[in-house]
Image (spheres, grey):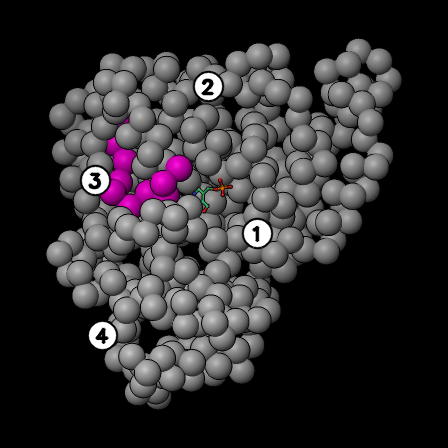
Amino acid sequence: MIYLDNAATTFIHPEVIEAIKDSLGNTKGNPSSVHELGFKATREWNAVKDRIGAIFNVSKKHLIFNSSGTEANNIVIQGRYFKTPSLRFITTQTEHSSVLNTFKAIEARGADVVYLDVDEEGFIDLSALKKALKEAPTSLVSILHTNNETGVIQDIDAITRLAHAHGALVHYDMVQVLMHDSVDLNAMNCDFATFSAHKFFGPKGVGLTYIKDHASILPHTVGGSQEYRLRAGTPNLSFALGFVRALELTEAHRQSWQETIDRLAHALIKKLEASNLDYTLNGPPLEGQRIPGTLNIAFKDLDAIDLRFFLNDHDIYLSLGSACDAESMHASHVLRAMFKEDEARINSSVRISFSPDITDSDLDTLVKTIETFKKSA
Ligand SMILES: Cc1ncc(COP(=O)(O)O)c(C=O)c1O
Protein backbone atom coordinates (compact mmCIF):
# COMPACT_ATOMS: atom_id res chain seq x y z
CA MET A 1 0.00 0.00 0.00
CA ILE A 2 1.28 3.47 -0.90
CA TYR A 3 -0.44 6.14 1.17
CA LEU A 4 -0.31 9.60 -0.40
CA ASP A 5 -3.28 11.14 1.40
CA ASN A 6 -1.65 12.61 4.51
CA ALA A 7 -3.51 15.92 4.14
CA ALA A 8 -6.71 13.91 4.75
CA THR A 9 -5.25 12.24 7.80
CA THR A 10 -1.93 10.90 9.06
CA PHE A 11 -1.44 7.51 10.72
CA ILE A 12 -1.37 7.77 14.48
CA HIS A 13 2.18 7.37 15.88
CA PRO A 14 2.75 4.26 18.08
CA GLU A 15 4.07 6.45 20.94
CA VAL A 16 0.86 8.48 20.79
CA ILE A 17 -1.19 5.28 21.05
CA GLU A 18 0.84 4.30 24.12
CA ALA A 19 0.28 7.72 25.76
CA ILE A 20 -3.48 7.46 25.16
CA LYS A 21 -3.67 3.86 26.41
CA ASP A 22 -1.76 4.78 29.58
CA SER A 23 -4.06 7.66 30.27
CA LEU A 24 -7.26 5.69 29.56
CA GLY A 25 -6.14 3.17 32.15
CA ASN A 26 -4.91 5.64 34.74
CA THR A 27 -7.12 8.69 34.62
CA LYS A 28 -10.22 7.79 36.53
CA GLY A 29 -11.53 11.10 37.87
CA ASN A 30 -13.49 13.98 36.38
CA PRO A 31 -11.59 17.29 36.58
CA SER A 32 -14.80 18.97 37.78
CA SER A 33 -15.04 16.72 40.87
CA VAL A 34 -14.10 18.31 44.19
CA HIS A 35 -12.12 15.40 45.64
CA GLU A 36 -8.65 13.99 45.18
CA LEU A 37 -9.39 12.07 41.93
CA GLY A 38 -10.83 15.27 40.44
CA PHE A 39 -7.84 17.31 41.64
CA LYS A 40 -5.49 14.75 40.04
CA ALA A 41 -7.36 14.95 36.71
CA THR A 42 -7.27 18.77 36.88
CA ARG A 43 -3.54 18.73 37.51
CA GLU A 44 -3.04 16.45 34.49
CA TRP A 45 -5.31 18.63 32.34
CA ASN A 46 -3.37 21.76 33.31
CA ALA A 47 -0.06 19.99 32.68
CA VAL A 48 -1.15 19.04 29.13
CA LYS A 49 -2.08 22.64 28.43
CA ASP A 50 1.18 23.95 29.89
CA ARG A 51 3.11 21.65 27.56
CA ILE A 52 1.17 22.94 24.54
CA GLY A 53 1.40 26.56 25.74
CA ALA A 54 5.19 26.21 25.98
CA ILE A 55 5.36 25.03 22.36
CA PHE A 56 2.98 27.69 21.01
CA ASN A 57 4.42 30.43 23.29
CA VAL A 58 1.08 31.33 24.92
CA SER A 59 -0.47 30.86 28.34
CA LYS A 60 -2.64 27.77 28.83
CA LYS A 61 -5.73 29.84 29.54
CA HIS A 62 -5.97 30.68 25.84
CA LEU A 63 -6.17 27.02 24.73
CA ILE A 64 -9.61 25.39 24.43
CA PHE A 65 -9.81 21.68 23.63
CA ASN A 66 -12.69 20.29 21.57
CA SER A 67 -13.63 17.41 19.31
CA SER A 68 -12.06 18.30 15.93
CA GLY A 69 -10.66 20.96 13.64
CA THR A 70 -14.24 21.36 12.46
CA GLU A 71 -15.52 22.16 15.95
CA ALA A 72 -12.48 24.35 16.63
CA ASN A 73 -13.46 26.48 13.60
CA ASN A 74 -17.15 26.55 14.59
CA ILE A 75 -16.23 27.82 18.07
CA VAL A 76 -14.52 30.85 16.51
CA ILE A 77 -16.90 31.67 13.68
CA GLN A 78 -20.23 30.99 15.38
CA GLY A 79 -18.89 32.39 18.66
CA ARG A 80 -17.88 35.63 17.01
CA TYR A 81 -21.21 35.82 15.15
CA PHE A 82 -23.16 35.39 18.40
CA LYS A 83 -21.08 38.21 19.87
CA THR A 84 -21.23 40.63 16.90
CA PRO A 85 -24.15 39.61 14.65
CA SER A 86 -24.42 42.91 12.83
CA LEU A 87 -20.77 43.29 11.85
CA ARG A 88 -19.13 42.05 8.64
CA PHE A 89 -17.25 38.75 8.30
CA ILE A 90 -14.55 38.21 5.68
CA THR A 91 -13.23 34.86 4.48
CA THR A 92 -12.07 33.30 1.20
CA GLN A 93 -13.63 31.08 -1.46
CA THR A 94 -10.94 28.45 -0.86
CA GLU A 95 -11.55 27.58 2.80
CA HIS A 96 -11.99 24.07 4.16
CA SER A 97 -15.68 23.11 4.27
CA SER A 98 -15.69 23.39 8.09
CA VAL A 99 -15.13 27.13 7.66
CA LEU A 100 -16.98 27.71 4.39
CA ASN A 101 -20.17 25.94 5.49
CA THR A 102 -20.09 27.60 8.93
CA PHE A 103 -20.03 30.96 7.16
CA LYS A 104 -22.89 29.82 4.87
CA ALA A 105 -24.84 28.87 8.02
CA ILE A 106 -24.40 32.27 9.69
CA GLU A 107 -25.08 33.97 6.36
CA ALA A 108 -28.42 32.12 6.24
CA ARG A 109 -29.16 33.63 9.67
CA GLY A 110 -28.48 37.12 8.30
CA ALA A 111 -24.71 37.67 8.63
CA ASP A 112 -22.87 39.88 6.14
CA VAL A 113 -20.16 37.58 4.78
CA VAL A 114 -17.62 38.46 2.07
CA TYR A 115 -15.91 35.54 0.29
CA LEU A 116 -12.66 36.82 -1.22
CA ASP A 117 -11.62 35.52 -4.62
CA VAL A 118 -8.14 34.07 -5.27
CA ASP A 119 -5.75 34.29 -8.22
CA GLU A 120 -4.66 31.32 -10.35
CA GLU A 121 -2.02 30.33 -7.79
CA GLY A 122 -4.58 30.44 -4.95
CA PHE A 123 -3.57 33.70 -3.24
CA ILE A 124 -6.06 36.29 -2.05
CA ASP A 125 -5.70 39.86 -3.29
CA LEU A 126 -4.74 42.07 -0.35
CA SER A 127 -6.29 45.14 -1.97
CA ALA A 128 -9.63 43.27 -2.19
CA LEU A 129 -9.30 42.47 1.53
CA LYS A 130 -8.58 46.13 2.27
CA LYS A 131 -11.58 47.23 0.22
CA ALA A 132 -13.90 44.79 2.05
CA LEU A 133 -12.55 45.98 5.42
CA LYS A 134 -13.08 49.63 4.48
CA GLU A 135 -16.64 49.12 3.24
CA ALA A 136 -18.15 47.98 6.56
CA PRO A 137 -17.15 47.59 10.22
CA THR A 138 -15.75 44.07 10.36
CA SER A 139 -15.88 41.54 13.18
CA LEU A 140 -13.58 38.82 11.87
CA VAL A 141 -11.23 37.99 9.04
CA SER A 142 -10.99 34.17 8.87
CA ILE A 143 -8.36 32.77 6.52
CA LEU A 144 -7.02 29.30 5.77
CA HIS A 145 -3.32 29.61 6.68
CA THR A 146 -2.14 26.64 4.56
CA ASN A 147 -4.54 25.26 2.00
CA ASN A 148 -5.41 21.59 2.48
CA GLU A 149 -5.86 20.97 -1.28
CA THR A 150 -2.96 22.93 -2.77
CA GLY A 151 -0.47 23.64 0.03
CA VAL A 152 -0.62 27.40 -0.65
CA ILE A 153 0.35 29.61 2.32
CA GLN A 154 -1.38 33.00 2.43
CA ASP A 155 0.43 36.22 3.29
CA ILE A 156 -0.27 35.92 7.01
CA ASP A 157 1.60 38.94 8.42
CA ALA A 158 0.09 41.33 5.90
CA ILE A 159 -3.43 39.95 6.52
CA THR A 160 -3.05 40.33 10.31
CA ARG A 161 -1.78 43.90 9.97
CA LEU A 162 -4.61 44.87 7.61
CA ALA A 163 -7.34 43.28 9.74
CA HIS A 164 -6.10 44.89 12.94
CA ALA A 165 -5.62 48.28 11.30
CA HIS A 166 -9.34 48.19 10.48
CA GLY A 167 -10.43 47.04 13.95
CA ALA A 168 -11.21 43.45 12.91
CA LEU A 169 -10.04 40.30 14.72
CA VAL A 170 -8.23 37.64 12.74
CA HIS A 171 -8.55 33.83 12.71
CA TYR A 172 -6.26 31.35 10.99
CA ASP A 173 -7.29 27.77 10.29
CA MET A 174 -3.87 26.20 10.96
CA VAL A 175 -4.96 22.58 10.72
CA GLN A 176 -2.47 21.81 7.91
CA VAL A 177 0.50 23.68 9.37
CA LEU A 178 2.08 21.71 12.18
CA MET A 179 3.70 18.88 10.25
CA HIS A 180 5.50 21.52 8.19
CA ASP A 181 6.22 24.47 10.45
CA SER A 182 6.60 25.50 14.08
CA VAL A 183 4.02 27.93 15.46
CA ASP A 184 4.56 30.89 17.79
CA LEU A 185 1.06 32.23 18.40
CA ASN A 186 2.36 35.14 20.43
CA ALA A 187 4.63 36.32 17.61
CA MET A 188 1.85 35.79 15.04
CA ASN A 189 -0.34 38.22 16.97
CA CYS A 190 -3.54 36.57 15.73
CA ASP A 191 -6.76 36.51 17.77
CA PHE A 192 -7.78 32.91 17.03
CA ALA A 193 -6.07 29.83 15.60
CA THR A 194 -7.35 26.28 15.14
CA PHE A 195 -5.65 22.87 15.06
CA SER A 196 -6.50 19.17 14.72
CA ALA A 197 -4.34 16.33 16.10
CA HIS A 198 -4.90 13.81 13.30
CA LYS A 199 -3.02 15.95 10.78
CA PHE A 200 0.26 15.46 12.66
CA PHE A 201 0.20 11.81 13.76
CA GLY A 202 -2.25 12.31 16.63
CA PRO A 203 -5.70 10.78 17.14
CA LYS A 204 -8.76 11.73 15.12
CA GLY A 205 -11.45 13.50 17.16
CA VAL A 206 -9.45 16.10 19.06
CA GLY A 207 -9.12 19.76 18.10
CA LEU A 208 -7.77 22.87 19.76
CA THR A 209 -8.84 26.51 19.54
CA TYR A 210 -6.52 29.34 20.54
CA ILE A 211 -8.53 32.32 21.81
CA LYS A 212 -6.58 35.44 22.74
CA ASP A 213 -9.46 37.19 24.54
CA HIS A 214 -12.17 35.03 26.13
CA ALA A 215 -14.63 37.93 25.94
CA SER A 216 -14.33 38.14 22.14
CA ILE A 217 -16.78 35.25 21.56
CA LEU A 218 -19.90 33.69 23.04
CA PRO A 219 -19.93 29.89 23.43
CA HIS A 220 -21.60 27.76 20.77
CA THR A 221 -21.76 24.79 23.18
CA VAL A 222 -23.18 25.64 26.60
CA GLY A 223 -23.54 23.52 29.71
CA GLY A 224 -21.02 23.16 32.51
CA SER A 225 -18.20 25.52 33.38
CA GLN A 226 -15.46 23.59 31.56
CA GLU A 227 -12.94 25.43 29.37
CA TYR A 228 -13.78 28.84 30.90
CA ARG A 229 -17.42 28.29 29.86
CA LEU A 230 -16.32 28.60 26.22
CA ARG A 231 -16.86 24.89 25.41
CA ALA A 232 -18.89 22.88 27.88
CA GLY A 233 -18.44 19.14 28.29
CA THR A 234 -16.27 16.83 30.38
CA PRO A 235 -12.82 17.11 28.80
CA ASN A 236 -11.23 14.20 26.97
CA LEU A 237 -7.97 14.08 28.90
CA SER A 238 -6.66 10.96 27.15
CA PHE A 239 -7.03 12.43 23.67
CA ALA A 240 -5.62 15.77 24.85
CA LEU A 241 -2.59 13.79 26.00
CA GLY A 242 -2.49 12.19 22.54
CA PHE A 243 -2.56 15.70 21.04
CA VAL A 244 0.38 16.94 23.10
CA ARG A 245 2.43 13.75 22.62
CA ALA A 246 1.94 14.00 18.83
CA LEU A 247 2.85 17.69 18.95
CA GLU A 248 6.04 17.02 20.94
CA LEU A 249 7.08 14.25 18.53
CA THR A 250 6.40 16.59 15.62
CA GLU A 251 8.50 19.32 17.22
CA ALA A 252 11.37 16.87 17.76
CA HIS A 253 11.34 15.43 14.22
CA ARG A 254 9.97 18.26 12.09
CA GLN A 255 13.25 19.37 10.62
CA SER A 256 14.30 15.96 9.36
CA TRP A 257 10.72 15.15 8.22
CA GLN A 258 10.67 18.40 6.30
CA GLU A 259 13.99 17.70 4.63
CA THR A 260 12.69 14.30 3.57
CA ILE A 261 9.36 15.66 2.32
CA ASP A 262 11.04 18.49 0.42
CA ARG A 263 13.37 16.00 -1.24
CA LEU A 264 10.42 13.72 -2.11
CA ALA A 265 8.47 16.60 -3.66
CA HIS A 266 11.41 17.55 -5.86
CA ALA A 267 12.01 13.89 -6.73
CA LEU A 268 8.39 13.46 -7.83
CA ILE A 269 8.55 16.50 -10.10
CA LYS A 270 11.80 15.18 -11.64
CA LYS A 271 10.23 11.77 -12.22
CA LEU A 272 7.18 13.39 -13.84
CA GLU A 273 9.50 15.45 -16.08
CA ALA A 274 11.22 12.26 -17.19
CA SER A 275 7.89 10.46 -17.81
CA ASN A 276 5.59 10.71 -20.80
CA LEU A 277 2.93 12.43 -18.67
CA ASP A 278 1.79 15.95 -19.48
CA TYR A 279 1.39 17.51 -16.03
CA THR A 280 1.04 20.92 -14.37
CA LEU A 281 1.68 21.66 -10.70
CA ASN A 282 -1.32 23.66 -9.48
CA GLY A 283 -0.53 26.59 -7.17
CA PRO A 284 2.88 28.21 -6.80
CA PRO A 285 6.10 26.43 -7.85
CA LEU A 286 7.88 24.20 -5.32
CA GLU A 287 10.15 27.05 -4.22
CA GLY A 288 7.17 29.42 -3.83
CA GLN A 289 4.98 30.33 -0.85
CA ARG A 290 3.71 26.83 -0.18
CA ILE A 291 4.36 23.63 1.74
CA PRO A 292 6.05 20.92 -0.36
CA GLY A 293 4.07 18.15 1.34
CA THR A 294 0.75 18.80 -0.44
CA LEU A 295 0.98 18.85 -4.22
CA ASN A 296 -2.03 19.36 -6.45
CA ILE A 297 -1.24 18.17 -9.96
CA ALA A 298 -3.25 18.30 -13.20
CA PHE A 299 -2.59 15.46 -15.65
CA LYS A 300 -3.65 16.71 -19.08
CA ASP A 301 -6.43 14.66 -20.71
CA LEU A 302 -6.69 12.21 -17.80
CA ASP A 303 -9.93 11.99 -15.83
CA ALA A 304 -9.04 12.47 -12.16
CA ILE A 305 -11.93 10.38 -10.82
CA ASP A 306 -11.04 7.41 -13.06
CA LEU A 307 -7.36 7.85 -12.22
CA ARG A 308 -8.10 7.76 -8.49
CA PHE A 309 -10.08 4.49 -8.91
CA PHE A 310 -7.29 3.00 -11.03
CA LEU A 311 -4.65 3.92 -8.44
CA ASN A 312 -6.89 2.58 -5.68
CA ASP A 313 -7.08 -0.75 -7.54
CA HIS A 314 -3.26 -0.75 -7.45
CA ASP A 315 -3.21 0.02 -3.69
CA ILE A 316 -2.10 3.62 -4.18
CA TYR A 317 -4.26 6.01 -2.16
CA LEU A 318 -4.66 9.70 -2.86
CA SER A 319 -7.50 12.25 -3.12
CA LEU A 320 -8.96 14.69 -5.58
CA GLY A 321 -9.38 17.33 -2.92
CA SER A 322 -10.61 17.59 0.64
CA ALA A 323 -11.65 14.26 2.18
CA CYS A 324 -14.58 16.08 3.79
CA ASP A 325 -16.01 16.94 0.35
CA ALA A 326 -15.34 13.59 -1.28
CA GLU A 327 -18.90 12.38 -0.77
CA SER A 328 -20.39 15.27 -2.67
CA MET A 329 -18.61 14.29 -5.96
CA HIS A 330 -18.58 18.01 -6.82
CA ALA A 331 -15.48 19.38 -8.46
CA SER A 332 -13.17 21.02 -5.93
CA HIS A 333 -14.38 24.50 -4.94
CA VAL A 334 -10.73 25.41 -4.34
CA LEU A 335 -9.64 24.57 -7.89
CA ARG A 336 -12.81 26.19 -9.27
CA ALA A 337 -11.94 29.44 -7.48
CA MET A 338 -8.40 29.26 -8.92
CA PHE A 339 -9.18 28.14 -12.49
CA LYS A 340 -12.76 29.45 -12.97
CA GLU A 341 -14.18 27.89 -16.17
CA ASP A 342 -11.15 25.69 -16.97
CA GLU A 343 -13.07 22.44 -16.46
CA ALA A 344 -10.36 20.36 -18.15
CA ARG A 345 -7.76 21.42 -15.59
CA ILE A 346 -10.13 21.07 -12.64
CA ASN A 347 -11.29 17.60 -13.68
CA SER A 348 -7.80 16.25 -14.30
CA SER A 349 -6.27 17.29 -10.96
CA VAL A 350 -5.35 15.07 -8.02
CA ARG A 351 -3.85 15.81 -4.60
CA ILE A 352 -0.69 13.97 -3.55
CA SER A 353 0.20 14.56 0.10
CA PHE A 354 3.34 13.12 1.67
CA SER A 355 4.52 11.72 4.94
CA PRO A 356 8.22 11.19 5.69
CA ASP A 357 7.71 7.42 5.29
CA ILE A 358 7.28 7.59 1.51
CA THR A 359 10.21 6.24 -0.49
CA ASP A 360 11.65 6.97 -3.92
CA SER A 361 10.49 3.59 -5.10
CA ASP A 362 6.92 4.46 -4.00
CA LEU A 363 7.14 7.50 -6.26
CA ASP A 364 8.48 5.38 -9.15
CA THR A 365 5.50 3.04 -8.71
CA LEU A 366 3.11 6.01 -8.64
CA VAL A 367 4.46 7.52 -11.86
CA LYS A 368 4.58 4.14 -13.65
CA THR A 369 1.00 3.37 -12.60
CA ILE A 370 -0.23 6.73 -13.89
CA GLU A 371 1.59 6.02 -17.18
CA THR A 372 -0.16 2.64 -17.38
CA PHE A 373 -3.49 4.36 -16.74
CA LYS A 374 -2.73 6.86 -19.52
CA LYS A 375 -2.07 4.02 -21.98
CA SER A 376 -5.33 2.32 -21.05
CA ALA A 377 -7.43 5.52 -21.07
C1 LIG B 1 -7.68 22.99 6.66
C2 LIG B 1 -8.58 22.11 7.46
N1 LIG B 1 -9.41 22.66 8.37
C3 LIG B 1 -10.22 21.91 9.12
C4 LIG B 1 -10.26 20.55 8.99
C5 LIG B 1 -11.20 19.76 9.83
O1 LIG B 1 -10.51 19.02 10.80
P1 LIG B 1 -11.21 17.71 11.45
O2 LIG B 1 -11.05 16.60 10.43
O3 LIG B 1 -10.42 17.46 12.70
O4 LIG B 1 -12.62 18.07 11.71
C6 LIG B 1 -9.44 19.93 8.05
C7 LIG B 1 -9.49 18.45 7.84
O5 LIG B 1 -9.49 17.96 6.73
C8 LIG B 1 -8.57 20.72 7.26
O6 LIG B 1 -7.75 20.18 6.35
Q: Which residue is mark 3?
A: 116
The mark that comes first in sequence, 3 or 4, is 3
Residue that mark 2 sits on: 220
What residue lies at 18% left-to-right and 66% top-to-bottom? 344
Sequence-wise, the earlier of marks 3 and 2 is 3
Which kind of residue does numbered mark 1 sit on?
Phe
Residue placed under numbered mark 4 in the picture: 301
Give the Cα distance between marks 1 and 2: 26 Å
Image depth: mark 4 or mark 1 in front: 4
Residue 94 appears in the figure: yes
327, 34: nearer the viewer: 327
Q: Residue at x 52, y 71 (%)?
A: 315
Is the residue marked by circle 2 packed among few (<14), some (14-19), or many (20+) residues within 10 Å? some
Question: Looking at the image, do the residues carrying marks 2 and 4 touch, with CB atoms under 8 Å apart?
Answer: no
Q: Nearer the viewer, residue 168 or 148?
A: 148
Give me the residue at 57% from left, 67% from top.
356
Mark 3 or 2, which is nearer the eye? Answer: 2
Q: Quadrant of the C terminus?
A: bottom left
User: Amino acid type of disc 4?
Assistant: Asp
Number of residues whose C-alpha sits closer than 10 Å to that of mark 3, classed few (under 14), some (14–19) or many (20 or more): some
Q: Nearer the viewer, mark 2 or mark 4?
A: 4
Q: CA distance from mark 3 to mark 2?
A: 25 Å
- Residues packed near mark 4 inside 10 Å, few (<14), some (14 to 19) or many (20 plus): some
Give the x, y percent position of residue 20. Answer: 74, 42
Q: Nearer the viewer, mark 1 or mark 2?
A: 2
Disc 1 crowd rating (10 Å Cα; few below 14, some 14-19, many 20+) is: many
Magenta region includes residue 298: no
Q: Earlier in the sequence, mark 2 or mark 4?
A: 2
Residue at numbered disc 1: 200
**Which segment did they paint magenta?**
89-98
Q: Secondary structure at mark 1?
A: loop
